[in-house]
Each structure stands twice: as C-alpha cells, then as structure tokens.
Image (spheres, rainbow, N blue to C red):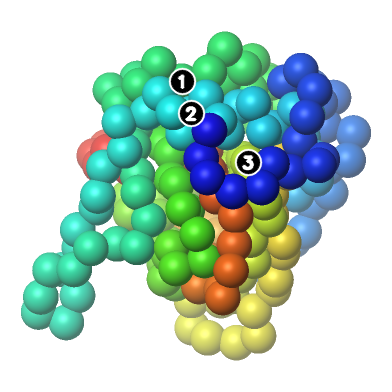
Amino acid sequence: MLAGQRSLFGGGAPSIDGDFRRLRRIQLDATAWLDHCPGWVEGHQEVLDVLAATTRWQRQRVEMYERTVDVPRLVAALPEDGPGHPLLPRMIAALDGRYDVAFTRIGLALYRDGNDSVAWHGDRVARDLPVAIVATVSLGEPRKFLLRPAEGGRALSFALGWGDLIVMGGASQRTWRHSVPKVARAQPRVTVMFRPEWPEGRY
C-alpha cells in the first residue's frame, strides 16, 4: 500500500453501482456535457492499493516553453504496464452499456502527494476530434478537479475521490480544459481513465 492514511470511506469489497443511481448530467454548453456519479466504486481503497502496487509507473515528459520537463505525476497504460484489478472489466462493461461506446483503452495516473498535479489541458488526440468521450474514476482521497472553457472564463470545481466517476462527452475535450492543481497536503490518489480506440496516442 502507498504511504498515507487509509480512507475511512474506502473499505469493504470492491464493487460498482451498475445502475448509475447517483449520476447527474451537467450540460456545459450546447455541444459539451459532463456526467458526475459520486461513489460509483465501493471499496475503492483496495482497488487503489492493488493498482499502486502492481503497476509499472512511468514518468511522462513534455515539451514546454522550448524545453522538456517532467509531468508532476506518474502514468501507466494497461495491460502494458500491469495486470490491473478484477473490477476493471466490470467497470468497462457497465460504461460500454450505458454510453454505447467500446472503451478499449485504460490509462492510469498516480498523484503521490499534493505536489503532483496536471495543468490545464484537453486530452491529447481527443481535443482534436469533433466529439470524444472519456470516463475517469478517482480512487483515494479527493482532490480538486477544475473545468473551464478553453477560451477562458469561470471554472467549475469538483472534489473527486472515494470512487467518484466523471464522464466528459460531446465536444468537452475540444472546447473545455481541465486540471488538478497542486495543494499543500494530499493523500495518494489514482485515476483510471477509460477511452475508446482513437487514431493515435497511448495516453
């Protein structure tokens, strides 16, 4: 298990809410939407522990201001970087059925502490498509997730963790940007990102 305090809300056998009973849709604009389903994964702590321990985490480097820098979080892809968890196929089956999309690609991100973050962005490849859908499950302690129009404007804020699910669809990856900012202190958190097969790109 990662160092840090075990969540009081994450115990029990892992399972999902296959009926999406707590899901609500937020229409971001005429062409973009976001679904938010709090606590979609029960027993999320075990899933986090298994993924953290069995995944071969990678450092990601990007070009920024004419130099190459490390992204302040670790990433991985399944099955290339690890065996995953037995609950993941059930997540995919439920998401496939609800959204009528084949989620064939699984990406992971590990936020080790409050210093790990991700800057404002739209998913690579998806941000160049007319429409795209990405489903993300947040395991572990909640972190702030910000979402704002690509052209600027007021940001929406969510505290995502403890098995929450968000699904960004329509033109949201192209016309909106999202981020996870740094914080003074934070417990470990893993996000699991489910995507369809797109023309190129691993993550």
- The one nearer the camera, 153 or 40, is 40
Q: Quadrant of residue 137?
A: top right
Q: Secondary structure at mark 3?
A: strand
Instruction: Say if residue 175 shows up in the picture.
Output: no
Mark 2 neighbour class, 10 Å CA radius: few under 14, some 14 to 19, many 20 or more: many
Give the image quarter of residue 153: bottom right
Residue 84, label in figure: 1
Query: How many other residues sit within 10 Å of disc 3, few (<14), some (14-19) or many (≥20)?
Result: many
Measured in 3D between alpha carbons, the distance from the residue under mark 2 to the one under mark 3, in whole angstroms, is 10 Å
* Mark with earlier residue (1, 3): 1
Residue placed most toward the observer, 164 or 177: 164
Q: Report if residue 67 is visible in the image.
A: yes
**Kind of residue at badge 3:** Leu
- Which amino acid type corresponds to the residue marked 1 in the rendered image? Gly
Q: Residue at x 72, y 64 (%)?
A: 158
Residue 50 image offset from top left, x and y in percent: 52, 24
Circle 1: element type: loop
Residue 40 on image: x %, y %: 77, 35
Residue 139: which numbered mark, if any?
A: 3
Q: Which mark is first along the chain, 3 or 2?
A: 2
Q: Nearer the viewer, mark 1 or mark 2?
A: 2
Tag 2 secondary structure? helix
Q: Mark 2 near mark 3, Cβ–Cβ under 8 Å?
A: yes
Report the residue marked by disc 2. Answer: 51
Label 1 vs 2, first from the N-terminus: 2
